[in-house]
Image: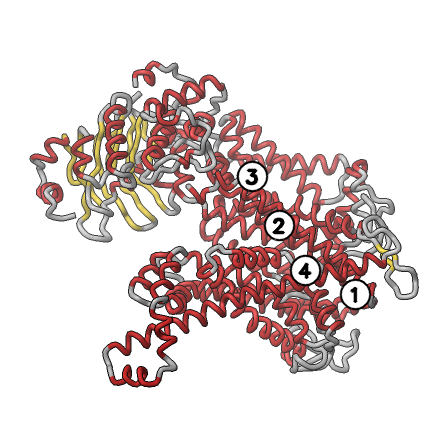
Amino acid sequence: MDTPDTAPPQDVPTSPDLLADSPDGPRRGSRMSDARPAPGKRQAGKVRIGDRLFAGSSRGSGIVLLVVMAAIAVFLTIRSVNAISHDQGNFLTTFEWNTQEGAPLSFGIAVLAFGTIVSALVAMIIAVPVAIGVALFISHYAPRRMAQALGYVIDLLAAVPSIVYGLWGALFLVPHMLGVNAWLNQYFGWTYLFGQSQPGAQPRSLFSVGVLLAIMILPIITAVSREIFLQVPKMYEEAALALGATRWEVIRTSVLPFARSGIISASMLGLGRALGETMAVATVLSPSLLLSFHITDPGGSTIAQNIATQFGESQGVGRDALIASGLVLFIITLLVNGGARLIIARRKEYSGANA
Amino acid sequence: MAKRIDVSGLNAYYGSFRAVEDISMTVEPRSVTAFIGPSGCGKSTFLRTLNRMHEVVPGARVEGKVMLDNEDLYGNGIDPVAVRRTIGMVFQRPNPFPTMSIKENVAAGLKLNGVRNKKLVDEAVERSLKGANLWNEVKDRLDRPGAGLSGGQQQRLCIARAIAVEPQVLLMDEPCSALDPISTLAIEDLIGELKEQFTIVIVTHNMQQAARVSDRTAFFNLSAVGQPGRLIEIDATEKIFSNPSVQATEDYISGRFG
Amino acid sequence: MSTISTSPRRSPLQGSLKERRLPRWTPVATVAGAVALAVVLGVVFDITSHLQWGLMAAIFFVAGQYLLARQVEGPRQAKNGLVSSLVWVAFLLALLPLFGLLYYTISKGASVINGTFLTHSMNLISPNQVGGGLYHALIATLEQVGIATLVATPLGVLTAVYLVEYGNGGPLAKAVSFFVDVMTGVPSIVAGLFILTFWIVILNQPYTGFAGSLALMILMLPVVVRSTEEMLKLVPNELREASLALGVPKWLTILRVVLPTAIGGITTGVMLAIARIIGETAPILMLVFGTDVINTNPFKDPQSSLPLYVYQQYAAGTDASQARAWGAALVLIALVMLLNLVARGIARWKAPKASR
């Protein structure tokens, strides 16, 4: 990408000459009669216009993208500020979402943010270790044929739309979570987390959502991690092998350190999906604005799901309140991505890229 | 510390393709044996069969015997991991672990083998780096990443890493082909010193290098592309380069082909 | 060098090449033992759930195998074996729900799909009535995704060209790159909300398929930019230099050398981006409104869409409608799979012959 610098200067000397040329009738005529220099000059003219057009349109595209993005950010902020200024409660701590016209507006993000983060956390705790295991299985343990087939199936599953996961989650997973919840309540009820206030209640809970989200993001994290495991240069693995390392030691000394930042970004990609997921949550959860650490109790809400269920009934400031919550979701996702990038940047010194 | 290798009737395959055919030879202890021959003649493949690195490639397998003193490396109940610990290897491109410091790189093999005693590890690191003629250049920056060294230094770091686990044999797969002449000279000098301690086998494309560093030279050739590589002859280096017994060797050495 | 020979020999580095190995039948024996133990415990403690029996057996197997290996083969081999077991367990654990999902969708959906289902709309069909179809949703999805692709692809590719070939890391390039990253993180519901307020409420536009397309564009753009950027970066600089050295102007170099070299990867990226947005439900739910009749004009009146159709049929809650939801889900998966296959085909067809 340094080379492009060298190209334009070659054109620069010819260009003013050419600009002066074109309105000049006689000279243009003489050029036509003079066959030899014409092709060269004509070509130089095309170069300049072509380059300018192409560079301009590509720069223009970048600017359009920038403007769209800036518009979204500014717009969401203005609307959110408007909503929060009308909020009778405290936007950060109120446990309500009353945005109906007429009644006093009172809404807060606390319950929604809690539900979003808890369900995403449950998903990450389940999905990340399993995904790394499956990715390792495909890249280093499975027989080659099987690995290829599995790789394809995982890629496909990563592309299955979330609404399908939602449908399956609501109609298949939720009924089957009943037994799991009872078991967790029986043996791990003492942790408070898995204790149920009404045993046997429909498991349309944050925990079920977390499990479904885990299943949903598992293929994504697996697919990306597998790519990264396969990219580890063979020579590092051979170095470990030649020192007399077992398979696990090869993975520990050369594969995992090399892939660490990649695993982190894969996980963050999954986390981003889990945080912003709407439909899979909306189909499984029976929403309520209760903040409870009994994560197997039905109820709870996430930001995205709340927007999907409320936007139809909201007008005016009520809609702005939803936008404010969307902005919070946006910021959470940004923080997650930014955090991941920081971790990756800090480890860059040791990454394989500059080896 | 150094052991003899006896190879008999060895064939190496990639899937159904036979890369190396029916090789028998003896590698003498405390000496340098060089493998030369045209590209694709199977000399690197053969080298990798000597510490069971060949089978790491999916679909690759080996037939025949490789005796290290009195033990067949391909015998029943032999652990390839233990084989690789006993027969170290240095690769074509320097491959220090990118996530580890210089010291950690040298100590990597020891750590894997359960040596946790800090004093022992430090001693071994210093001894190995001195053995690889690298100590004076890196002793003040042992905690810097190994990837920050120059190519030649990296390759000597890899040699230090290999000798830190005190192997019986050291295999070198074109260790200088990615290096500049000065670094190459440093490695060649090092090989001359290391042969006091280790049995060394080196694959090289550079015939002058084979002539300079080795005691014995083996010439490999293949009859045609797609055919397996074979051992043409092995003899004292002086004899191979002055008066080889096979015409093909003389043709190759005098530059008539390859 | 003499220091090496005088060094004390330490036991971990020595020893025979033969390592003590567990006999080959050990894993089978451990499995049998673990299952037996689990069954006994299950019967004695009266545990009804067979899932728990399985879990117990798995735990006993992993633990038993580890302890045995530790006794006979030593800690290094034991740890190696333990990780292998865990990787296998992870694999089986992931396999169950994922294949369960595919199996369940296919078995439920296949019985619904027939000629009528694919060629009819839901016009005049009540939720608890059998029949009807998804033709209206299929057409609408293709139109909405098509419009989004037509706009987002050139815009995204050109932006990537700017970032890689013209930006030179300047302030504008940095800003664009940063905002692309930011855009990648926009949750689809937020994109939908933005278009809803901006396009429908403020500009007072009606609910149409095009409004949905706008949101899909926002979601698709960053994916296209990023994947194209990666692909352009993979084109070796030598190729550009070779072309420039022949006196080919820069824009022609990009158009004739750089883009064709990367076209396979770019197309794959676009296909995968389409596969990603084709299943988006939330923004469609907000912007396209949904309808039961066939509306082929994405710029006028509400449309439906496949994912929205799945959701609405699920939400209707009757047996007949949920069956239709499975059928539509299967069609959606098939569509995504087709896109994936096409993307792979293009990638393989256009890939430089030597690589992979």
Q: Chain of mark 3?
A: C
Q: Are marks 3 and 1 on the same chain?
A: no
Give the image location of residue B94, x and y in percent.
35, 37
Are the residues at dot 3 and dot 4 in contact (C-beta closer than 8 Å)?
no
Badge 2 density bin: few <14, some 14–19, many ≥20, Cα 10 Å: many
Q: Quadrant of residue B205?
A: top left
Residue A36 visible, this orientation: yes
Q: Where residue A337 is drawn, which disc sits there?
A: 2
Badge 1 density bin: few <14, some 14–19, many ≥20, Cα 10 Å: some
Of marks 1 and 4, which one's residue comes earlier in the chain? Answer: 4
| Gap between marks 4 and 2 measured at Cα | 17 Å
Residue occupied by mark 3: C85
Q: Are marks 1 and 4 on the same chain?
A: yes
Mark 3 is on which residue type?
Answer: Ser
C343 vs C3: above or below: below
Q: Are marks 1 and 2 on the same chain?
A: yes
Give the image location of residue C103, x and y in percent.
63, 60
Q: Nearer the viewer, residue B44 or C350?
A: C350
Of marks 1 and 2, which one's residue comes earlier in the chain? Answer: 1
Mark 1 is on which residue type?
Answer: Phe
| Gap between marks 3 and 1 measured at Cα | 48 Å
- The quarter in which the C terminus of chain C is drawn is bottom left
Residue occupied by mark 1: A311
A60 vs B104: above or below: below
A202 vs C131: above or below: above
Q: Where residue C34 is drawn, which disc sits there?
A: none
Q: Nearer the viewer, mark 1 or mark 4?
A: 4
Residue occupied by mark 4: A73
